[in-house]
Image (tube, grey):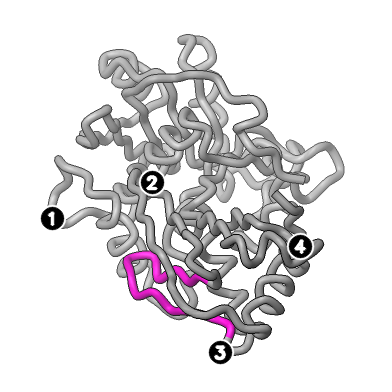
Amino acid sequence: MSTALSDVAVEIRGPFAGVDVGGRQKGFHCAVLDESDHVVLSRQPTPASVVDWLVGSGVTLVAIDSPRSPAPAGHKSRDGERELVAAGVCNLRYTPDRASLDANPRYYEWIEHGLELFDACDAAGIAAIECFPTASWSRWAGPRGATARAAWTIEALARHGLSGLQRRLSQDDRDAVAAALTARAHARGETESFGDIVVPLGPRILVTLGAFYSDAGDWPTRLDIPVTTYRNLLDTLSDGALVRLHAQLAVNVVADGGEIRAYGNSHTMTYRAGYKPTLDARRAVDAAARWLDVKSG
């Protein structure tokens, strides 16, 4: 089961950092994100140099794109990894146990390098969390599908409106920035955890239904769900039950003068729908609530 940060959140202020971990020859791609949405990038060769750079940058929280620990002895993966895949966030390469890491040190060198970085951060008193940028990109932009990873992440990154970035970034640089954005989301209580893996909640929608629906019986007056989940839900509902609003998040609303708020990526949008409710619309919202197992609010 995933754990929402809102249940255990603490106040943390930036700057925030993200680190994309490579092997010993490749080193680390790092990004620092300040409170004004400005990013500074850096390449560092060793865990010690990363920590020195983080300390010099005043970083309060860093998200590291690497497993924080191996799988338990005798296991080929960690519980959180299997939960993340089962939740449909994205796929990933599983982390085996310590014996398997030791048996193939060249292949798993980057994991060992990441473990060393976590230890170095702990020793320096820098708060560090594990992240997986592909999961973060998936939450911000939806599944990649057949889109090239570069195009997918470039478009998703552009939505955040960050400054200080070069026109051309490597995928490792973009993943480091995604990690830094994940660290900030974590500090704001906008993440959930699958084991040690911290994943942004992504854009969500809050639908408040009108009075017509409030008196209709035993079904919810509010829906609070991920935008990507709601998009997927559209295929299960009849066209006559939906009002399409073409906006940045392509949100949809079924309501009689109700209100929908789409929030995420540091902005809020509010829309109102004014049309005569139909039985189909009522059934659509009821079906959505049952499908998402949302309780009456």
- Residue under label 4: 219
Is the residue under label 1 in contact with that under label 2 (CB below 8 Å)?
Answer: no
In which quadrant of the rendered view does residue 141 lie?
bottom left
Instruction: Give the label, 2 or 3, closer to the camera.
Output: 3
Q: How far apart are marks 3 and 4 (CA)?
A: 21 Å
Q: Which of marks 2 and 4 is nearer the N terminus?
A: 2
Q: Earlier in the sequence, mark 3 or mark 4?
A: 4
**SS assignment at label 3:** helix
Q: Earlier in the sequence, mark 1 or mark 3?
A: 1
Q: How far apart are marks 2 and 1 (CA)?
A: 16 Å
Is the residue under label 3 in contact with that under label 2 (CB below 8 Å)?
Answer: no
**SS assignment at label 4:** loop
Is the residue under label 1 in contact with that under label 4 (CB below 8 Å)?
Answer: no
**Up-down relation of residue 126 to residue 140 (above or below):** above
**SS assignment at label 2:** helix
- Residue under label 2: 178
The numbered disc on residue 167 is 1
Please state the extent of the stretch shown in magenta in the rendering. 241-253
Is the residue under label 3 in contact with that under label 1 (CB below 8 Å)?
Answer: no
Q: Could you tell whether 184 is left or right of 90 in the image?
A: left
Q: Residues within 10 Å of mark 1 (few under 14, many from 20)?
A: few
- Residue under label 3: 239
